[in-house]
Image (tube, rainbow, N blue to C red):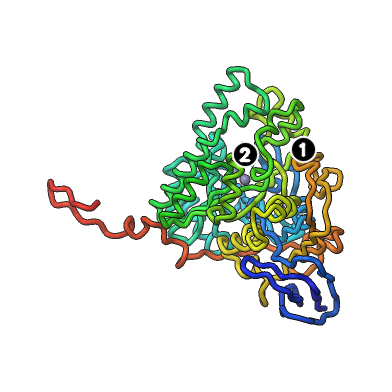
Amino acid sequence: MSKVIKGGTVVTADLTYQADVKIEDGKIVEIGPDLQGDEVLDASGCYVMPGGIDPHTHLEMPFMGTHSSDDFYAGTRAALAGGTTMVVDFALPDPGQSLLDAIKVWDNKSARACCDYSFHMAITWWGEQVFDEMKIIAQEKGINTFKHFMAYKGSLMVNDDEMFASFKRCAELGATPLVHAENGDLVAEMTAKLLAEGNTGPEAHAYSRPSQVEGEATNRAIMIADMAGAPLYVVHTSCEEAHEAIRRAKMNGKRVWGEPLIQHLVLDESEYFNEDWDHAARRVMSPPFRNKKHQDSLWAGLASGTLSCVATDHCAFTTEQKRYGVGDFSKIPNGTGGLEDRMPVLWTYGVETGRITMNEFVAVTSTNIAKILNCYPQKGAILVGADADIVVMDPGMGKTISADTQASSIDYNVFEGIEVKALPRYVLSRGYVAVENGELKAKEGHGEFVARDPNATVNKALSKWKELTAPRPVARAGIPATGV
Ligand code: DUC
Ligand code: ZN
Ligand code: ZN
Ligand code: ZN
């Protein structure tokens, strides 16, 4: 049974052109004019683009005394409803737990996924076992990305020596380290001080994690990665200081990428000063929302290419869960949703306003991350042979975002009331029509794991790599060598 997406404009990261797209057995088999197929999907007036890839989700994650509410079923339904056809979730070992056991846990959870998915492995502790298992994970388990939390002291956080050891291991394996870049020691200290002074409300969450803690940690992670000879992917880049560190690294020839979230691009810190405690607490996430200066910086980064991918960090908690933090903001589960809204909201605030082009939209929602993750062009491409993960975006369709109509299982939406100007008419997940004329038909268990090999030969090339790994001049007794 073949399908043809007919009459649309194909938009990729580098081209815009009129063509039909033919699909068979889950793959794109032909692109060109006047194609015929068993089933026709009318794309007239629409843009035919690679399905979105969200590189940063936390589905059914045990965190802060509870679990994020959207599991792989609800989360990937939400993804498909908004044009995202692949998510990358973080397998999170408990400190001391085998990384291989954590994969088993995530394998079980993801069995219900409606769209394709992959995993990053979080390094939540360090030891010989972790060092050994990283090799199995990179070489046999299809996971070439390892995440490090520089915050969440006392639970997920790793220290600099552990990060350096892990980054060096990543470099050896051709894997890419990821960081959540906030200075966890300072956050812990400021949190304690704020609480002691009686600042217990959700707005204090933002005070406890100013942009400086993110800028400092981002720069530190970049320098540690450079010394380790590893590239670096910085998740949820939310502020100018962090963006500045990434820009500088790029200018110096370092392979570093930054990932703003759709939430940080569109929502600002005033949300935390809402009189309604629930309203503010629902928006508590780390890093917190920032002011307009930081938002402008992030938009500029997307336009100029110094920031690479727009993600969500989808980690949805119900209002009831958020209320665990009444009287103590540090107990409000950190996280917001966004999977369903990322593509339409970015289109509305980015493409419709002229801040980014349609091709840049495709780059930052799909193609760039497919390349970074080493699954391009299986994903992130409209090319013959690529998986038929496709979104047919209809600029004639719009809606007002509302929790009442969302696929996510929680009882609110942080984008509530925003009018989006485009929505998917069709979404195809390896050829399966998961959204048809705007109607969600996601199929439980349709999603498959996307294995991603290491990049052993191409993933280094940081500025210092050659220098640091070259043999050093040996000092003669008593006389220091030069050039070291
Ligand atoms: N930040 C969040 O807000 N939630 C999940 C983890 C994180 O780093
Ligand atoms: Zn649990
Ligand atoms: Zn994080
Ligand atoms: Zn996250």
Q: Earlier in the sequence, mark 2 or mark 1?
A: 2
Q: In this rendered view, identify the residue nearer to me: 250 or 287.
A: 250
Image-based side of 438 in relation to 338, left or right: right
Q: Residue at x 83, y 57 (%)?
A: 397
Quarter holding residue 34: bottom right
Query: Mark 1: which amino acid?
Result: Thr
Report x, y in % for residue 274.
73, 29
Report x, y in % for residue 13.
63, 65
Say if disc 1 is inside 8 Å of ligand 1. no
Q: In this rendered view, identify the residue nearer to me: 465 or 16.
A: 16
Q: Residue extending furthest front?
A: 354
Query: Mark 2: which amino acid?
Result: Lys
Image-based side of 310 in relation to 183, left or right: right
| Residue 475 in sight from this viewpoint | yes
Element type where label 2 sits in the image: helix
Q: Residue at x 61, y 68 (%)?
A: 14
Q: Quadrant of the N terminus?
A: bottom right
**Above or below, comparing residue 279 to residue 41 in the picture:** above
Numbered mark located on residue 292 in the image:
2
Classed neighbour count for the residue bearing mark 1: other residues with Cα under 10 Å, few (<14), some (14–19), many (≥20): some
Classed neighbour count for the residue bearing mark 2: other residues with Cα under 10 Å, few (<14), some (14–19), many (≥20): some
Where does label 1 land, which residue? 318
| Residue 169 in sight from this viewpoint | no
